[in-house]
Image: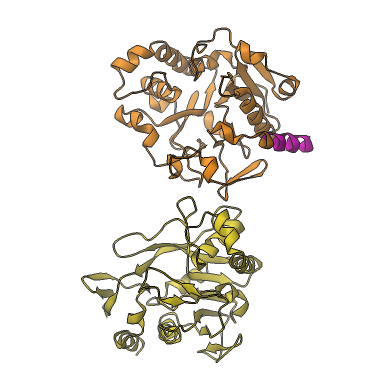
Chain colours: A orange, B yellow
Amino acid sequence: MSVDRGFLTIAQNTAEVDYLRLAYAQAMSIKLTMPDSQYCVVVDEDTEKQITDKHRDLFDDIVVLDEDYAKQDEWKLANEWQVFNLSPYKETIKVESDILFTRSITHWWHAFRLRDIVLSLGTKNFKGDPATSRVYRRIFDANQLPDVYNGLMYFRYSETASEFFDIAEQVFKQWETVKENVLKGFIYEEASTDVVYAIAAKTLGVERCTLPDCDFINFVHMKNAINDWPDDKPWDEMIMTELDLPMIRINNVNQYHPVHYQDKNWLTDEIIERYEECLHNKN
Amino acid sequence: MRGTLSMKNLNDNAKSRGVLLFAYNTDSVDYVKIAERAARLIEHNLKLPVTIITDMKSPQTNERIGYKDGSQWFNGDRYRAYELSPYDETILLDSDYLILDNTLDKIVDTVDDYRIMTNNQSPTHSQDGDMGILSLHFVWATVVVFKKTQKAKQLFDLVGRIQRNYEYYIKLYNLREDNFRNDYAFSIADNILSGYTHSKGIPWSMLTIDNLVKNIETKNNKLIVREVDKAHVITRQNLHIMDKDYLLSDTYLTLVDEICQ
């Protein structure tokens, strides 16, 4: 695989969540399924201090944010738009850090190249079926926004992608105005990256940044309602998971798409140890 | 006819393709009589030999709650269908599944190892569902088509193992009911054998009449199914009839006589 392309995630630790740890597990899942892949993690200064030798051994690139626009935020999304300039690769698959890969998606690169930027469209439930629940997407429906997810996206160093991230930057920076004057029914204080990217996609032109015919370009989302499960408990307290790494079996169903486990407590130390052992044995 | 070898083969010249029915009488339902009537329809419409397996003592008794005040039925030996079938290619049916066309004979040609009925609907609504609120979609063991291959044997062996360890699989698969149910056992076995996904099932839906039936008529290429308070006019096709009283009635016998004359 060319070093001109690679995976990238942002890992900014908070008081609640060790995102560096999630990125570490993600990088192992990528190295297991796509051994030639490059992996870059973007961190802030505080998170950089927590990087150890095992991280350096695993991550191909570590980029430290010059300007942290999410310093005051508990949910650090305000730096998302910066990935275009921070990525060391000509072509980047940007993923949220709580996504694990169970098999190679190398063939996706060919589909991604049909556009300069591709946002994943829709999502799947654990059975591998397209999710139909709109519980978490009411704001999208109310504002007729495209059903895009920033959890997994592709961009090439290009004018179109640059234009997209410029729009995203403006939406993030003008969030109060957008929230008050543009969006209907938005009830949260902070900007959600999915909503910001949906606005950017609609502004840029949905046809320029999505591939609706390539309906395999998305991931399994483990939010309860998407899987028709009750919402009163975290999914991992109700559902059994088996590891046959790199395969992850959830509720007796093999997961062939990237798994957005979403509940950070699911990623136990035992799971990380299993990844380490598996990667060690492979190497 | 009694015991493991008490197969009542309605066609002495058994061919390599045929239909297998299980029929165990209970205190309230003469399943053997229902199976014999079903066999006549099968022979007439599918032109295949039929084997009825009867009177093997079931290892457990299942009380089915919710239909006719909890009528009994024995369902514990279905996993032995592979072992007991005298055919190379078998259509395994419930005896309350009325064969009124020849579509199942056609599906056998397309089967590599096995195919199970995946979808079920009544005339008014889908009867598909999950094995529990946190579980997986279930298939309908009412109709299973299989060939004598290694994978098909694994399916039936696995169903047997699931039956013997049902308490474990209830927890593993978050099953809704404690009573053993073949539909669930076949669903689980299919899930495991298909690499923790699911296999291709029979590509059409089963039509189930789940209310009490007054009578069924055939007219041209149509079926008129009369229930207590309504009737359905449907294209002629196979029917899954839940009302055992109807299947034991003279009205049903008359229908069988008319069709098979």
Residue occupying the point 68% across, 42% down: A245
Residue occupying the point 53% across, 16% down: A84
Q: Position of residue A98 (x, y in %)?
A: 57, 30
B213 magenta-colored: no
Residue occupying the point 21% across, 71% down: B229
Q: Which residues are magenta?
A: A272-283
Answer with left or right where residue A215 lies relative to residue A182.
right
Is residue B87 placed above or below A117 in the rendered structure?
below
Residue occupying the point 42% across, 25% down: A208
Q: Does the rendering let one see residue A198? A: yes
Q: Nearer the viewer, residue B18 or B161?
A: B161
Label the magenta part by its dominant secondary structure. helix
Q: Position of residue A28 (x, y in %)?
A: 68, 31
Q: Residue furthest top?
A: A66
Q: Does the rendering let one see residue B111? A: no
Quarter holding residue A27: top right
Q: Quadrant of the C terminus of chain B?
A: bottom left
Q: Position of residue A178 (x, y in %)?
A: 34, 15
Is residue B174 placed above or below B3 in the rendered structure?
above
Answer with left or right where residue B5 lies relative to residue A126.
right
Q: Position of residue B170 (x, y in %)?
A: 55, 58
Quarter holding residue B111: bottom right
